[in-house]
Every structure is written in structure tokens, then in C-alpha cells.
Image (cartoon, rainbow, N blue to C red):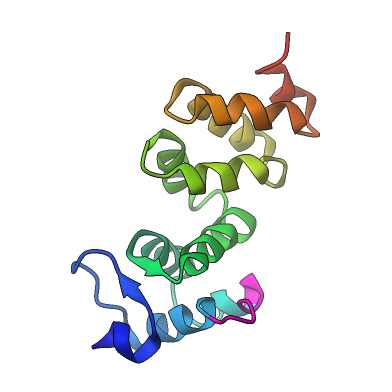
């Protein structure tokens, strides 16, 4: 019923969004683009947990999960580091891995290096080798260039 009401598809049945999370999903699902990450954070008590649940469970529209992931990368990189690292090591998460690789310069440098190392030894190594040489950080580029 929830999916029909707010026009989303949920993957799996192990998550029941709170009323605030339902509002978050609605905002992320907007055809006009979501509000700012700061505005999305203000909608829920625990933005990291709620955004992680959206990424994991909301499959439609596809931009809802990607927008939630972007907010984790931009606003909460250190709190979401375990989740972000998991994306880099999961063969099913190519789209999320690409988003992280495109955003690697927005991460704190130690985290950027850790994430890059995980990517280079994981299922997204080919993508990492394409994207990491474009980093503005010499230390990140050094991981993939001689």
C-alpha cells in the first residue's frame, strides 16, 4: 500500500518506513529533483540510518536511492564510511560504486584513499582504474598511475 501511495517500489519486505522516512522518500522521489541534502537531513531524526535504508530498499524511482547515496557521501562520509566501503566491495552495487568514484575528491582524504583501495581490489576495479586517475588528489591518483 505504501508503495502505491507514494509511487515507489520497495525492495524486499524487511523495512517499514516511519512517517518521517515516508516524507523523505517522497522528497527524494520528486521529478523536479530532491531538496538539498541539508533539507533532507532535517526531515528525519537519524539522517544516516534513514538515508542508508532508502539506498538499500527503495528501487523506484531509481534516482531516489542515488540521491540518498549522494547525501551520505556529501553530508555524512565518515558516519557512512562502512556502508560506502561495502558498496565498493559489492558486485551488485556498480551504480553506487561509480557515484562514489566520481565523488572521491569530496571525501576526507584518508577515507578517499581507503575507499579507492577497496575499489581497486574489488569487483569494481576496472571502473576504479578509469575514474581514479581523474582525481584532483595526487595521493589518490598515485594508487593507479605509475
> Residue 93 or 74: which is nearer the viewer?
93
Q: Is residue 44 visible?
A: no
Please identify the quadrant where the N terminus is shown: bottom left
Residue 2 sits above or below residue 139 on the image: below
- The image quadrant that residue 134 belongs to is top right
Residue 138 sits above or below residue 42 on the image: above
* Side of 4 relative to 55 (left or right): left
- The verdict on residue 86 being magenta is no
Q: What residue is at 62 percent from the left and 79 percent from the top?
A: 39
> Residue 79 or 71: which is nearer the viewer?
71
Please identify the quadrant where the C terminus is shown: top right
What predominant SS class does the magenta segment belong to? loop
Q: What residue is at 50 percent from the left and 48 percent from the top?
A: 96
- Give how far across and how far down residue 75 sits, in percent: 62, 60
- Give how far across and how far down residue 100 sits, in percent: 58, 44
- Give how far across and how far down residue 112 sits, in percent: 63, 35
Q: Is residue 143 visible?
A: yes
> Residue 84 or 13: which is nearer the viewer?
13
Name the residue furthest top.
Answer: 146
- The verdict on residue 35 being magenta is yes
Report the magenta residues as a range.
30-38
Q: What residue is at 62 percent from the left and 71 percent from the top?
A: 37
Name the residue furthest left.
Answer: 13
- The image quadrant that residue 25 belongs to is bottom left
> Residue 98 or 85: which is nearer the viewer?
98
- Give how far across and how far down residue 132 sits, in percent: 68, 29
Amino acid at each position: 500500500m505504501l508503495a502505491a501511495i507514494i509511487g515507489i517500489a520497495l525492495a524486499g519486505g524487511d523495512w517499514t518506513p516511519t512517517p518521517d522516512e515516508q516524507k523523505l522518500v517522497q522528497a527524494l522521489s520528486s521529478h523536479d529533483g530532491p531538496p538539498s541534502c541539508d533539507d533532507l537531513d532535517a526531515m528525519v531524526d537519524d539522517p544516516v540510518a534513514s538515508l542508508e535504508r532508502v539506498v538499500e530498499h527503495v528501487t523506484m524511482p531509481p534516482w531516489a536511492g542515488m540521491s540518498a547515496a549522494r547525501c551520505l557521501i556529501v553530508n555524512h562520509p565518515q558516519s557512512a564510511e562502512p556502508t560506502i566501503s561495502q558498496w565498493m566491495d559489492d558486485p551488485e552495487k556498480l551504480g553506487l560504486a561509480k557515484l562514489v568514484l566520481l565523488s572521491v575528491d569530496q571525501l576526507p582524504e584518508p577515507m578517499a584513499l581507503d575507499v579507492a583501495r577497496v575499489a581497486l581490489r574489488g569487483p569494481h576495479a576496472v571502473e576504479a582504474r578509469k575514474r581514479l586517475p581523474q582525481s584532483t588528489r595526487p595521493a589518490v591518483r598515485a594508487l593507479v598511475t605509475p
